[in-house]
Image: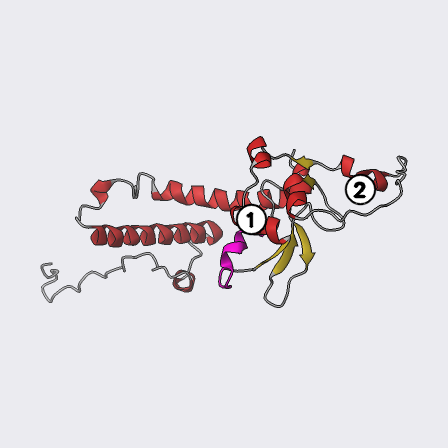
Amino acid sequence: MIDARGPYYVKLKEGPDARGAIRVMCPAGGSCPSDNCAGHDRLHPPARTTMPARVIDLDTPRTRTAHAAARPTIHISDAERLTPPSPEALPLVCVAGSITVPADTEAADWRLAKYRQDVHYLDTSWLNTYKPIRSQNEGANGRFKGDKLDIGNPKHRPAPGQVAQALLLAAMLTVANLRILETWLLERAGPDELTDVDFNAAGLLPPLTTPAIAPPAATANGRHPPP
């Protein structure tokens, strides 16, 4: 089912430039379309030429798949067929045939960045990227909403006002992140092997230790001074 979406992806027309922008085209356009679309044929009618009948070699898989009858068809509604929408109401790639998609949102046409398909939804590469991020987010949410911190409990932020609530929430999240780093350090080296350098490198304070206090010296009469 996932592989069946392949013919409907926009096709790469030109590789990335110096800034990483690519040029993509409609899957129904070009000399080798991957699907049939009545809307594309209406906006870009094919040239009417008189050509002799073409014989298809059914024993050649490449010839069979290149024929229009073997390509999937994008169906349009009856209302769109009877009352075609204006070009302004259609996606830009349908009207222009090809568009330039930037690599970042800092470009002038940053709204087109959402059309990049570097990682296809529910594809294997998408799952390998999404699952670790989702696991980390859910693990962090579990820590933040756990019994020890419970940032969702309004009783832990009694100060009134939106600004005060935001500052208290930021402080609570900072403490939670420091606890996560401390747990990672403890699991990596163990509590007996950690040094002050390890805690300082992670931005943490070393655990407090109570120094050993020697008992006061006895006085001349052999008694200890009062505490």
For mark 1, what is the residue?
Answer: 87
Q: Quadrant of the N terminus?
A: top right
Specify the quadrant of the image occupied by residue 37.
Answer: top right
Q: Give the answer, above or below, for where 79 lies relative to 28.
A: above
Which coloring applies here?
secondary structure
Residue at disc 2, secondary structure: helix
Q: Is residue 46 visible?
A: yes
Between 227 and 149, the one lying in front of the other is 149
Numbered circle sitting on residue 66:
2
Tell me where residue 65 appears, x and y as whole percent.
80, 39
Closer to the N terminus: mark 2 or mark 1?
2
Q: Amino acid at mark 2?
A: Ala
Image vertical order of residue 123 relative to residue 92, above or below = above
SS at mark 1 in the image: helix
Label 2: how many Cα within 10 Å (few below 14, some 14–19, many 20+):
some
Looking at the image, residue 85 sits to the left or right of residue 180; the answer is right
Instruction: Residue 89 in the image: state x and y as whole percent.
Output: 52, 46
Q: Tell me how many marks there are.
A: 2
The quarter of the image holding the C terminus is: bottom left
Asked whether residue 110 is drawn in magenta, I would say yes
Residues drawn in magenta: 105-117
The amino acid sitting under disc 1 is: Pro
Can the viewer see residue 117? no
Q: Nearer the viewer, mark 2 or mark 1?
A: 1
The residue shown at (32%, 52%) is: 175
Q: Horizontally, is 13 left or right of 181 in the view?
A: right
The residues bearing labels 2 and 1 have C-alpha atoms spaced at a distance of 29 Å
